[in-house]
Image (cartoon, grey):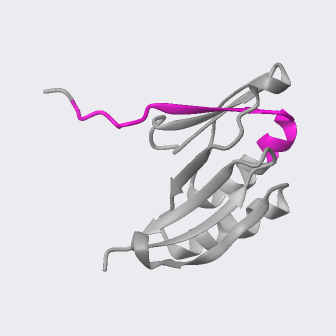
């Protein structure tokens, strides 16, 4: 019997300044338990140390037209505290706050939203069943 597949295997984000974005994603995703699992020149792939998918592949954009802009990526958080730490770490590492951590009743979740260095909407969400 085959194991069920995850809906997404990996996402790719192409950064205008790879080093700045790598510092941002490393700091912001660390509180969520997401670390760099693979690193090469101009590529950093982030995943949960217990499994390598789904993952986020951060890559250096070779030209301005290839930079990822306007994407919204939501990462699962194990607790409200993890959401809070994500929101504190992201702006300190080159991002900016969009929405401070708070309960979002319409989502039945506790969420925080930040912008990465290229303006993408990056979220940490702790799903709460009510």
Picture quadrant where residue 84 is located:
bottom right
Picture quadrant where residue 42 is located:
top right
Q: How many marks?
A: 0
Q: Which residues are magenta?
A: 3-23
Q: Is residue 122 above or below residue 105?
A: above
Picture quadrant where residue 93 is located:
bottom right
Q: Is residue 15 left or right of residue 48?
A: right
Q: Is residue 14 above or below residue 62?
A: below
Task: Give the percent coordinates (x, y) of residue 56.
Answer: 59, 37
Magenta residue check for 100: no
Task: Give the percent coordinates (x, y) of residue 74.
Answer: 54, 53
Judge by depth and name the residue closer to the eye, 78 or 90. Answer: 90
Magenta residue check for 8: yes
Query: Residue at the location (67% across, 69% down)?
Result: 85
Q: Is residue 70 left or right of residue 3?
A: right
Task: Give the percent coordinates (x, y) of residue 48.
Answer: 51, 45
């Amino acid at each position: 019997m085959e194991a069920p597949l995850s809906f997404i295997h990996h996402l790719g984000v192409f950064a205008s300044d790879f080093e700045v974005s790598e510092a941002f994603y490393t700091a912001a995703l660390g509180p969520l338990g997401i670390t760099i699992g693979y690193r090469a020149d101009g590529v950093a792939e982030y995943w949960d140390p217990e499994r390598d998918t789904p993952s986020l592949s951060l890559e250096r954009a070779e030209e301005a037209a290839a930079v990822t802009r306007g994407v919204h990526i939501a990462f699962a958080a194990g607790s409200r505290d993890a959401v809070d730490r994500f929101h504190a770490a992201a702006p300190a590492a080159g991002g900016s706050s969009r929405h401070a951590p708070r309960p979002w009743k319409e989502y039945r979740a506790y969420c925080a939203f930040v912008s990465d260095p290229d303006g993408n909407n990056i979220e940490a969400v702790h799903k709460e069943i009510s």
